Image (cartoon, helix red, strand yellow):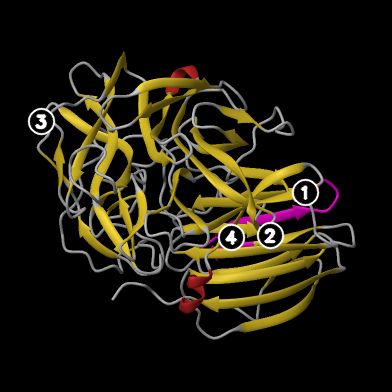
Amino acid sequence: MFYGGRAVAQKREGATYSEPYRPQFHFSPKKGWIGDPCGFIFYQGKYQMYWWGKVISDDLVHFKEVSTEVMSGGDSGLAYFTGSTLIDKQNTAGFGHDAYVAAYTIFNKESKNQSQGISYSKDGNTFHYYKGNPVLDIGSTEFRDPTVFWHSSSKQWVMVVAKALEKKIKFYGSKDLKSWNFLSDFGPAGAQEKAWECPDLFQLNVDGNSKEKRWVMVVSIDWAREQYFIGDFDGKTFTLAADQPEEALYVDHGLDFYASRTFRDYDGRLDATTSMGWIATWDYAQLVPSTWGKGFWSIARKLELKTYPDGLRLVQQPIDALKQLRGKLISAVYQIPAGTNMLKAFQPNKNTYELEAIFNTANPNVFGLNLCVGEGRNVSVSYDTKTNLLTIDRTNCAKEKIDKFSRKTSAKVLPVNGKLRMHFFVDQSSIELFTNDGKEVFTMLTYPGELQTGIEAFAKNEGTDLNMKAWSLKSVWK
């Protein structure tokens, strides 16, 4: 949503990357604020990521921060809000072959108007404000967050941009990135409570078949979560698939995953579609107790579409490259006794680990794990075999009081062949949980104290088996 207007002042002391709550295998800036991803590209053999600062990576595991501010030349009365980045290989805009072009929302600080603008760069590190801005202005204060990409079959650039309070996504086309023609509207549909923003549109393989693809549109909603739509896009109109349900399909069922972006491949080398999102929610994004700054991004996720009895669904899996961070494998098999007991095989001394827990669901029960256990606090992850509800409760987790933070979330998760797989990535102040093959994912902030590193297994009744694998994860910061 916003890059400029809502960032808060930060302490300016040097970063050590070992500060309390600092993620050890998620990207966070050295210091200061980070919000929505604003352009993810793979170009010249590097993953290049913007929040109108810039970071690069060879593997989406290790990161090199390039700059905290890549934009130059704009008027002091404007702010650069969320957008996207592209490579203009054919010089359609006249800034030069292979120019980097950033497309973003221009926020007028006085009038509050939101319009779309562009900046250009030769090296991707310093962008120059286009003097002809705005390139698209409809006189609205709720018109934002453009994703721009080349649509080959219609031979034009396509802009996907949100009309936020109308719960609509608008499509525009251009030959030169400067003059834009209205193509169509999509929406409202699915969840329509408050606002839509940060749209992304991309193609995914179906059931692992690279020759069968469908279009997926992701929309951030209500300043707190994301929904997705599956359909077709012909260069002008996005049309829902016939089996798209009326109820919303959520990208993430947790409490803190927002504004995700997919990587656009300008080298033609990637064999998978990958995304990352902002781990935060606007209710308390500026209130969290981190000292280096506020905000960080999720681990990278590989995206696909998979067919289920209820239809085609988005599945997400952590990228394989994260395995290089693993320490020694610790494994165990339990039959969980009734009550709550420490998970003796694995008790890490830091909340930086990966944990895979496979539960047998044959016997009716309520079971699960408590993470971040200590000082009378924890995060409870429970599953009820009768209702198939997985519930995560962090109401008594954070060491420090954060307004509006005490919450829980639930979603229905069906076992696969009588088993429920929970795949956790725990990192200092967050948890990402991928269930089964990644159809349901849960992401949330936690902010436990440094002594809250225990893990417990619990069950209402005897008879549930647990097969566990765990690894402590090395820090990516040196």
- The quarter of the image holding the N terminus is top left
Which of these two is toward me, 41 or 451? 41
Kindly identify the residue that appears in the image at 84 percent across and 57 percent down.
365
Circle 1 residue? 308
Q: Amino acid at mark 1?
A: Tyr
Circle 3 residue? 76
Q: Earlier in the sequence, mark 4 or mark 3?
A: 3
Q: Kindly identify which numbered label has been placed on residue 437.
A: 2
Which of the two discs, 1 and 3, sits closer to the camera? 1
How many residues crowd mark 4 within 10 Å: few (<14), some (14–19), many (20+)? Answer: many
Name the residue furthest bottom.
328
Left or right, 115 with respect to 288, comes to left
Is residue 445 something one can see in this rendering? yes
Q: CA distance from mark 1 to mark 3?
A: 51 Å
Q: Give the structural element (helix, strand or loop) at label 1.
A: strand
Q: Kindly identify which numbered label has been placed on residue 317.
A: 4
Main secondary structure of the magenta stretch: strand
Q: CA distance from mark 3 to mark 2?
A: 48 Å
Q: Amino acid at mark 3?
A: Ser
Whether tag 1 and tag 2 are in contact, CB under 8 A, the answer is: no
Q: Earlier in the sequence, mark 1 or mark 2?
A: 1
Which of these two is toward me, 323 or 409? 323
Kindly identify the residue that appears in the image at 51 percent across and 69 percent down.
453
* Residue 132 image offset from top left, x and y in percent: 16, 26
